[in-house]
């Protein structure tokens, strides 16, 4: 089953549907993630009495998933929003359950050499596609006003980060192939080409990720060779620099005058809003993937004047703060506990090895590179999936060590069976169950996106209305459809869609704004809409009460 999981992981990163779905990037990725994660979860449940799942991994994963469920049930978002998340991201309850299921499954085996091959193959395919985009010969009809280097992720920042991770993986492979001159030269050229693409993407995220990974290689070798003082000196210095950087982004500390400006200052506004959300909803968060709904309410006054009041976001651009803001502080603590345990597992593995394991060194570098990306970027399914793969693989190395330590009391056969099922039932049943569950949950969303795109292509207003009403209804598509109906002078149809939309999404800034702009709105209705807009965007002077 591991090979099937590996294939699905690769497909999640590169699957797109630009000719089929309205959102060309994420629905298909969510569908494949649902199949992969559900298969892993089914395997874990079927074999729960036969496998040795690390207790720390199991407990922290259950705490995180339970917290995500609590956030879904007790936040102000409706159930479909909590289940699927925000349009264009889809980091709702279902996605988090799938990611933790995959991570837990991968923690059972020492298999990173296989996963590394999968990652490098996917990375190389993405690298080639980026080259095609760089030369402007991409056949896909992407609508993009920024860098043409989008890869399969739909955004130059995401692709830059993915290329940064790929560069780290190729560096690890280069170390493994140094004794083969031709292969080493080829890999070195790929590294140069990847660096060129990262710079051409117009995003520094990939550079930040790549540098973090390369430094991690050096730190790994220092720790392995027992240069403890040098290791801790560099680690401490790096931590201090990181703390000053984070503080500077939000405008605090001696480096703030140098760093708190431009895009970093805007990112700092997002971070401050996330902290305010987390503080006000410490136990439940504002709801899975609902940062965008409440950003206007929690943004600070400087955020309005730094660019303009219309500049908003649907993410904190920091994965850790997204946890705290969307799901609550307990979810963040559970994830941080996993990271701490991962660091312990890494050091434990290194100390038990007589020589450097280059696969493990590459894994650690990739893990650290992803954490760097997670610090400064929103979530994207095709990118984030690898963070959970790397985390699971780290626990897998540690799990093998735990099994080996029991060899004095168990035979090798029993050890093998303690980590794997005794028969092939789960190998057949798990993918089947996973496919059915994954399709059951995700097909409605994919179908809705297909129908909406088809309706727009045929310019049929009635079909647009029908498509946007397919469950799960999407707030963003409702808003877009209302604006489309109004612009085509279909006022009554637009108002009807606003009314039904507000019943389902009462905190939708976009729908209240559309109602405020409705041509035939009464003064009472206009006053109500303005009051709601002021509630959702209290610092915006446009909605401030007169007098």
Image (cartoon, rainbow, N blue to C red):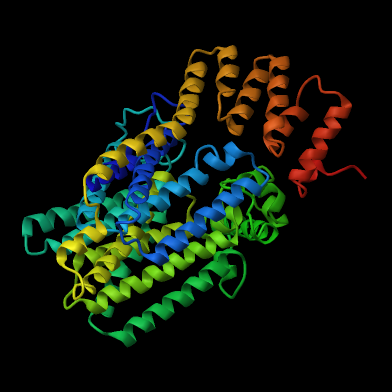
Residue 265: x and y in percent read 59, 59
For the N terminus, the quadrant is top left
Residue at 72% x, 16% y is 491
For the C terminus, the quadrant is top right
Observer able to see residue 383 = yes
Observer-nearest residue: 200 or 450?
450
Q: Quadrant of residue 464?
A: top right
Residue at 67% x, 53% y is 303
Residue 30: x and y in percent read 42, 38
Q: Quadrant of residue 67?
A: bottom right
Observer-nearest residue: 524 or 35?
35
Judge from the rendering whether residue 251 lies leftward or rightward of residue 543; answer left or right: left
Q: Quadrant of residue 388?
A: bottom left
> Does residue 533 lie above or below 413 as drawn?
above
Residue at 42% x, 47% y is 98
Q: Looking at the image, how many numbered discs can be counted on the residues?
A: 0
> Does residue 468 lie above or below 7 as drawn?
above
Residue 365: x and y in percent read 30, 64
Observer able to see residue 202 = no
Judge from the rendering whether residue 185 lies leftward or rightward of residue 294; answer left or right: left
Residue at 68% x, 22% y is 497
Which residue of the protein is positioned furthest toward the right in this rendering?
A: 547
């Amino acid at each position: 089953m591991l090979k099937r999981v590996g294939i699905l992981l690769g497909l999640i990163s590169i699957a797109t549907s630009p000719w089929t779905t309205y959102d060309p990037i994420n629905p298909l990725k969510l569908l494949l993630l649902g199949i992969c994660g559900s298969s892993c979860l089914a395997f874990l449940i079927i074999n729960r009495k036969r496998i040795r799942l690390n207790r720390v991994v199991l407990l922290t994963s259950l705490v995180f998933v339970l917290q995500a469920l609590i956030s879904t049930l007790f936040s102000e978002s409706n159930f479909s929003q909590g289940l699927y998340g925000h349009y264009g991201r889809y980091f709702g309850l279902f996605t988090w359950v799938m990611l933790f299921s995959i991570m837990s499954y991968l923690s059972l085996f020492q298999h990173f050499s296989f996963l590394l091959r999968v990652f490098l193959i996917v990375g190389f395919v993405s690298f080639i596609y980026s080259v095609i985009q760089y030369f402007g010969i991409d056949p896909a009809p992407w609508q993009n006003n920024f860098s043409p280097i989008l890869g399969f992720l739909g955004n130059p920042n995401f692709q830059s980060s993915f290329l940064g991770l790929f560069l780290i993986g190729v560096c690890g492979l280069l170390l493994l192939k140094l004794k083969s001159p031709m292969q080493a030269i080829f890999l070195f050229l790929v590294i140069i080409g990847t660096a060129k693409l990262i710079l051409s993407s117009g995003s520094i995220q990939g550079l930040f990720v790549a540098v973090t990974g390369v430094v991690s290689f050096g730190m790994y070798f220092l720790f392995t060779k027992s240069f403890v003082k040098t290791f801790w000196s560099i680690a401490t210095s790096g931590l201090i620099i990181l703390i000053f950087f984070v503080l500077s982004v939000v405008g605090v500390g001696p480096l703030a005058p140098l760093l708190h400006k431009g895009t970093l200052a805007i990112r700092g506004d997002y971070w401050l809003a996330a902290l305010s959300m987390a503080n006000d909803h410490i136990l439940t968060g504002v709801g899975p993937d609902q940062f965008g709904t409440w950003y206007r309410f929690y943004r600070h006054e400087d955020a309005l004047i730094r660019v303009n009041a219309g500049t908003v976001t649907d993410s904190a651009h920091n994965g850790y703060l997204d946890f705290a803001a969307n799901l609550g502080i307990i979810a963040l603590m559970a994830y941080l506990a996993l990271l701490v345990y991962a660091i312990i597992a890494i050091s434990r593995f290194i100390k038990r090895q007589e020589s450097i394991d280059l696969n493990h060194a590459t894994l650690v570098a990739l893990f650290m590179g992803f954490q760097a990306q997670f610090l400064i970027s929103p979530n994207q399914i095709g990118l984030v999936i690898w963070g959970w793969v790397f985390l699971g693989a780290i626990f897998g190395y540690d799990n093998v060590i735990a099994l080996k330590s029991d060899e004095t009391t168990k035979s090798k056969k029993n050890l093998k069976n303690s980590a794997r099922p005794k028969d092939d039932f789960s190998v057949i049943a798990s993918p089947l169950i996973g496919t059915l569950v994954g399709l059951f949950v995700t097909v409605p969303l994919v179908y809705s996106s297909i129908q909406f795109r088809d309706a727009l292509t045929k310019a049929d207003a009635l079909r647009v209305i029908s498509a946007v009403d397919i469950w799960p209804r999407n707030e963003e598509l409702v808003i877009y459809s209302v604006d489309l109906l109004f612009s085509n002078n279909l006022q009554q149809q637009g108002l009807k869609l606003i009314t039904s939309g507000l019943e389902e999404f009462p905190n939708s800034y976009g729908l209240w704004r559309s109602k405020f702009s409705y041509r035939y709105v009464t003064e009472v209705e206009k006053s109500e809409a303005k009051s709601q807009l002021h509630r959702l965007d209290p610092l915006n002077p446009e909605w401030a009460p007169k007098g």
